[in-house]
Image (cartoon, rainbow, N blue to C red):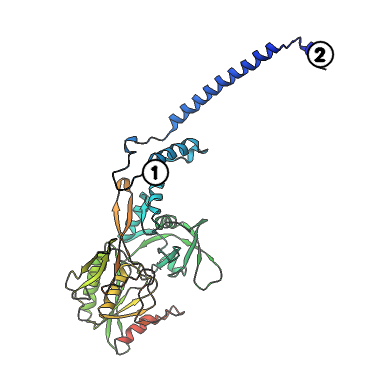
């Protein structure tokens, strides 16, 4: 068979010919590999994201960190990752910063890319497009509803303070940051977002479909109400501590006083907080002197934020309504009123957020929220994770037509 094959092709192979053939193939392979590899390297150099290498040196600090590993990993991932369209240097850059901040393990210390930074400022400004949910974290660092805003899609769908958000669309919220969650839930008016939620006491999760709308948040609402004994009191509903809160508060207080009220129900239910200086401003309306809140830094040093003005409601009796949706700045106000025995707290245990975040604008429309301190009530109580305990505990009840907590507050003015 072998002889016939050779004869058919008139081809004679010798040992030297084998060597020439193999050597030629090897040379061809090496040349081809070099050219191909060079072509690949040229393609990579043309593709490689532009990075300002002059900024690769870490700033001088007490930490001796060699950033070579970071840049080596950046180059390796950018060069080797199979889907070049997914190699977005801007996203990688923001992701690296986010990972650095997330490594602190504090869900309230977060890096905000431009979209998240914009959303945060819009919310504090009082208007945004979304579903009307204030978000936070529980003790297990699971994403939780602090409060639904009154009259919003979330409120109309029956979302309650304390409900856990397990998934947003198909994304598990475990380990998700607050800005990420907000960015996923918010969106253009008229579009839908699907949430998988779990309410305390339920045996399984439920799916909630919400249609986004324009959310206009008025910080303060008020109305005159009558107590069982016939007294007229002002029901001041404070829903947040935002940019317009102080001016809206002043208008409501002036209007309430012109109605000739003899008492105040300060309603802080489902108030997730906001600006610290807003809490001091509102607290100063009811307390004539002393600290509204104490701030404690990492070294354990305490600084008091004192009453900063003469309030108009110093001499009127006050009852404060709180629930599990009362958090942060609203707990500061309620805690000060309780500590000074200025009024009674009625309702259920508050949320328990006892840390202070500073907001910093960064280049490119980004920002960062950093937990810089704890806050404590004037008596030195830290309510983080535990919350404020009401003087009179009253559950909300199952009948939405009856406000049992408000009814109890009104009864106290007749005692």
Q: Element at badge 1?
A: helix
224 or 411: nearer the viewer: 411
Q: Which of 337 and 236 lies nearest the eye of the viewer?
A: 337
Q: Is residue 81 above or below residue 234?
A: above
Question: Quadrant of the rendered structure where residue 228 is?
Answer: bottom left
**Which residue occupies 36% across, 57% down?**
109
Q: Considering the image in quadrants, where does the N terminus appear?
A: top right
The image quadrant of residue 9 is top right
Figure check: 129 above or below 77:
below
Q: Is residue 149 left or right of residue 294?
A: right
Structural distance between the alpha carbons of marks 2 and 1: 67 Å
Q: Name the residue under label 1.
A: 93
Contact check, label 2 and label 1, Cβ < 8 Å: no
Q: Mark on residue 315?
A: none
Residue 58: x and y in percent read 32, 42
Residue 402: x, y in percent? 41, 81
Figure quadrant of residue 310: bottom left
Q: Residue at x 27, y 87 (%)?
A: 231
**In terms of secondary structure, where does tag 2 sit?**
helix
Quick one: quadrant of the C terminus? bottom left
124 up-or-down from 98: above or below: below
Of residues 138 and 204, the one drawn nearer to the viewer in this rendering: 138
Q: How many marks?
A: 2
Question: Quick check: 411 above or below 194?
Answer: below
- Residue furthest to the left in view is 310
In the displayed structure, does residue 89 sit left or right of residue 288? right
Q: How crowded is the residue under tag 1: few (<14 C-alpha within 10 Å), some, or many (20+)?
A: few
Pointer 2: residues within 10 angstroms few (<14), some, or many (20+)? few
Give coordinates of residue 382: x percent, y percent: 32, 70
Disc 2 vs disc 1: which is toward the camera?
2
Q: Mark 2 or mark 1: which comes first in sequence?
A: 2
The residue pinned by badge 2 equals 3
């Amino acid at each position: 068979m072998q002889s016939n094959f050779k004869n058919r092709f008139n081809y004679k192979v010798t040992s030297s010919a084998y060597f020439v053939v193999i050597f030629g193939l090897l040379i061809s392979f090496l040349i081809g590999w070099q050219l191909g590899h060079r072509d690949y390297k040229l393609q990579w150099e043309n593709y490689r994201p532009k990075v300002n290498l002059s900024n690769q040196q870490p700033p001088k600090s007490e930490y001796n960190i060699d950033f070579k590993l970071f840049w080596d990993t950046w180059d390796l991932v950018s060069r080797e990752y199979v889907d070049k369209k997914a190699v977005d240097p801007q996203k990688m850059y923001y992701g690296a910063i986010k990972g650095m901040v997330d490594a602190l393990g504090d869900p309230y210390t977060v890096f905000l890319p431009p979209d998240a930074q914009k959303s945060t400022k819009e919310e504090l400004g009082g208007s945004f497009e979304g579903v009307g949910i204030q978000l936070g974290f529980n003790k297990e660092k699971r994403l939780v509803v602090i409060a639904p805003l009154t009259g919003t899609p979330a409120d109309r769908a029956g979302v309650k303070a304390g409900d856990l958000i397990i998934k947003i669309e198909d994304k598990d919220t475990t380990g998700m940051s607050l800005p990420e969650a907000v960015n996923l839930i918010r969106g253009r008016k008229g579009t839908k977002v699907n949430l998988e939620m779990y309410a305390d006491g339920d045996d399984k999760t439920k799916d909630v479909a919400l249609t986004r709308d324009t959310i206009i948040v008025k910080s303060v609402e008020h109305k005159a109400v009558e107590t069982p004994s016939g007294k007229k009191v002002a029901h001041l509903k404070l829903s947040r501590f935002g940019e317009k809160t102080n001016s809206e508060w002043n208008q409501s207080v002036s209007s309430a006083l012109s109605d000739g009220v003899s008492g105040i129900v300060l309603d802080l239910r489902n108030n997730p907080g906001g600006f610290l200086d807003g809490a001091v401003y509102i607290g100063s309306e009811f307390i004539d002197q002393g600290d509204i809140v104490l701030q404690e830094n990492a070294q354990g040093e305490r600084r008091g934020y004192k009453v900063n003005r003469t309030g108009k409601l110093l001499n009127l009796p006050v009852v404060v309504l709180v629930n599990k949706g009362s958090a942060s700045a609203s707990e500061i106000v309620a805690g000060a009123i309780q500590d000074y025995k200025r009024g009674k707290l009625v309702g259920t245990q508050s949320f328990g957020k006892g840390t202070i975040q500073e907001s910093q604008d960064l280049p490119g429309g980004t920002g960062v929220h950093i937990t810089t301190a704890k806050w404590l009530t004037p008596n030195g109580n830290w309510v983080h994770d535990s919350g404020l305990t009401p003087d009179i505990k009253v559950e909300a009840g199952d009948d939405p037509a009856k406000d049992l907590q408000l009814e109890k507050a009104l009864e106290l003015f007749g005692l």
